[in-house]
Amino acid sequence: MIKLRSVFVDEPDPHWHKLKSPIPGHILFLVIQGSFTYIIGNETYRLMKGDILYMPYGVVREGIQMDGELHQKYTILFDLHPNQNLPILMQHQTVHIKTNNFEYLKQRFSILVQQWLGRLPYFQMMCEVIAQELLIAVNRESDVARYPSKKKAHVQILQKYIADHYRQHLGIEELANTIQRTPNYVTTIFKEVMGMSPVAYLHQVRISAAKELLLHTKMSVGEVADYLGFYDTSHFHRVFRKHTGQPPSTLLVELT
């Protein structure tokens, strides 16, 4: 396990500049908007939406906002327990990944921030479990680099197809037809590369869209459920709670 020290969201700031200095702990962040540059040793990282960066304790870095472009990212600062055995944490080197699982990671980071700021009973324990889950997901994506390029290409096609048709009823057979493979092959490679089934990924995309609709439109919970292709409102409630830990009506309350 890890010991969380801080969880926060960097809001867009035209004057953002991270002075050259060693980091005080281990850092993991996900860029969710805009772009900027990090300089770590002799390496320059141009970071943008969907990029993940892990930096181990003591790394000297400098952050620069390029051309006045704003950015936003989720960040966690943590310490390691001696028995930590995730490869990316044991190598003591910077890891840069362009995630193929952006919506899932964004959702989990969002819940992590909510729990950290809410400070409800047992929040520290819950936050550390979510942070550990995020690190495992990042480690899996790092491992994906070893997979055959054909598998990764197939999964990317499936992801795009889901993104284009997530409001429709999608079955494994239909997904299999998009790459002319068997349903069993689709399920197997998707779990290998993404760490979840195609159905779980579809629900994740739908819930991410649901959150945006509930927060930024006047649609009711029932209207959102129907718009996103759920069987009924009860089914939508169950899936939403499973993925976010709260009912969809919570987001409507936040707007009042």
Image (cartoon, rainbow, N blue to C red):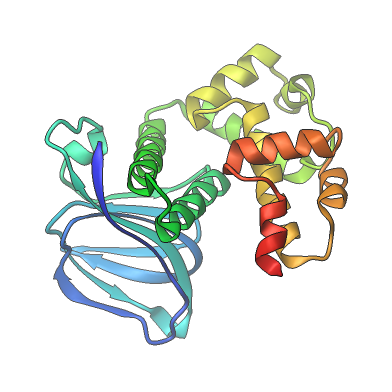
| Residue 159 is at least partly visible in this image | no
Horizontal side, residue 98 vs residue 200: left or right:
left
User: Residue 64, relative to residue 133: is it above or below?
Assistant: below
The x, y position of residue 140, in whole percent, is: 39, 33
User: Residue 137, relative to residue 76: is it above or below?
Assistant: above
The x, y position of residue 12, in whole percent, is: 47, 77
Q: Observer-nearest residue: 197 or 108?
A: 108
Image point 31% across, 80% down: which residue? 17
Q: Observer-nearest residue: 105 or 230?
A: 230
| Residue 11 is at least partly visible in this image | yes
- To which quarter of the image does residue 217 belong? bottom right
Horizontal side, residue 218 vs residue 9: left or right:
right
Image point 15% across, 59% down: which residue? 59
Horizontal side, residue 168 vs residue 191: left or right:
right
Q: Which quarter of the rendered picture does the N terminus lie within?
A: top left
User: Residue 143, relative to residue 120: is it above or below?
Assistant: above
Q: Which quarter of the rendered picture does the C terminus lie within?
A: bottom right
Q: Report the number of discs.
A: 0
Image point 39% across, 34% down: which residue? 145
- To which quarter of the image does residue 173 belong? top right
The x, y position of residue 81, in whole percent, is: 16, 38
